[in-house]
Image: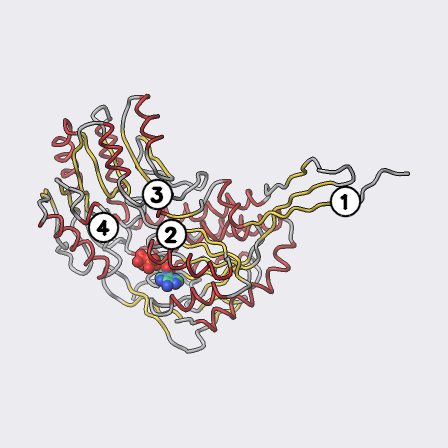
Amino acid sequence: MAQLPEFLKTECLVGGRWVSANSGDRLDVLDPATGDVLASVPRMGAADTRDAIDKAQIAHEEWSSRTAADRADVLHRWAAAMRADADDLARLMTLEQGKPFSESLVEIEYAASFFSWFAEEGRRLYGDIIPPHRPDARILVTRNSLGVVGGITPWNFPSAMVTRKAAPALAAGNCMVLKPAEATPLSALAIAALGERVGVPPGVFNVVTGGREEAPSIGKALIDSPVVRKIGFTGSTAVGKQLMRDCASDLTKVSLELGGNAAFIVFDDADIDAALEGVQICKFRNAGQTCIAANRILVQESIHDKFVEALCARAQEIKVGHGLEQDTGQGPLIDARGLEKVERLVSDATEKGARIHIGGRPHGAGGTFFEPTVMTGITPAMDISHEEVFGPVAAITSFKDERSAIGMANDTPYGLAGYFYSRDVGRIFRVADALNTGIVGVNTGLISTEVAPFGGVKESGIGREGSKYGIEDWTELKYICLAGLEAAA
Ligand code: ADP
């Protein structure tokens, strides 16, 4: 049995108590690399979720009345605790999610950074004083917490997606009920345990876990509750749209960070080595299971063959294995469903004429491991150019000129991230303007940071997370009209 951190609790945190589900049912959490059971967690349902909402509502009164500086102290302590236990948290993440340990460590720091950042942003939730519309009045605008909010998070970044929501929400004075992904609840529970250790008050941060079967009833309990005023969701576009439809019934706010179909464009004036480095990070990190992964790699005709050859050489070097083994560069896919999708997209592309240069099959390590893959000749007729691959498959197409590259890049209902490599300053501004995405990486494949706004346009979502903008969605403006201030007689 794998070693789990001693501070990890495998019950749900509700109102400051570690509890099991009313039903007593439990969900096994697996190591995707081996299929071994790591632990089990409660399969919470609607009634458990309502209980968590009640506890959060009670906690909100005290938490929201604290000074921002008080809340900041708690969040800073939480960040410090994550950093102090980074090795344990990263090992746990690798065990339940599969990503290489080195990547898990980076994610833990990224996750902690949201607590540090939003602790301070919470102190700067300034209001406004507006010149009044009549002489006897003053107009004040304040920013207030929403109350109880829900967070629903995915498995590909099991810690960072939790803190990217919880940190701004709590900094602004809200209390949260979090539902982590069924595949990776342990990282969320570990964060909750550290929160308890550093003095996050009971009910301020609650975690309800469940399987795929329970997710809709947990989601519905959150949305149907008149107390829950916002749902922050990261996940698939299909589920995001459903949640937004459901939220319409009582106008619960939503922020949605959904799927992407990022184009990664390499122009012939690019620094090719830098572009190769970028595509490797952007395509093979987390075995390609990121919503900002390079889904379609567009390479200008004149450098196409050279680029493909060099990318194959790099992909060949990636060591596939258990994320806790030394030098592992790529772990398994999350589950059989993920593997089936990648296999389907690769075989559809090859049937329609794409060429596999390396990889293309499940890896010899078995289970859900897939070979680092490089394919060329991708056309719009292939499913892989429309669907998020979520696997280590570099799907390459060549293009003629800047105009056609932009046309191809924007030919998708998604608009999360886009990337391009060029050293021409005019082109840099033109293409950055033209890409219809919420995020543009120019000469870099690594764009995630707590200081910048993360989010998409079109069907990739609504709202932004991180940065000074990322706290606004967790607040409501209040306009106070102070009248009757007549001049003294
Ligand atoms: P993926 O297919 O990558 O697992 P999902 O969108 O299905 O992405 O899952 C993202 C998160 O949304 C997970 O926490 C999952 O449990 C949750 N989820 C899935 N379906 C629903 C639903 N109907 N209502 C609420 N949450 C859901």
Mark-to-mark CA distance, 4 and 1 = 61 Å
Judge from the rendering whether residue 195 lies leftward or rightward of residue 34; answer left or right.
right
Q: Is residue 242 above or below residue 296?
A: below
1 and 2 marks in contact (CB < 8 Å): no
Q: Which mark is residue 483?
A: 1
Residue bearing mark 2: 87
The type of residue carrying mark 1 is Ala
Residue bearing mark 3: 416
Mark-to-mark CA distance, 1 and 3 = 46 Å
Judge by depth and name the residue closer to the eye, 374 or 146: 146
Mark-to-mark CA distance, 2 and 4 = 26 Å
Residue bearing mark 4: 391
The residue tagged with tag 2: helix, strand or loop?
helix
The nearer-to-camera label among 2 and 4 is 4
**Ligand 1 shows up in which quadrant of the image?**
bottom left
Regarding residue 479, the answer to whether it shows in the image is yes
Disc 2 beta carbon < 8 A from ligand 1?
no
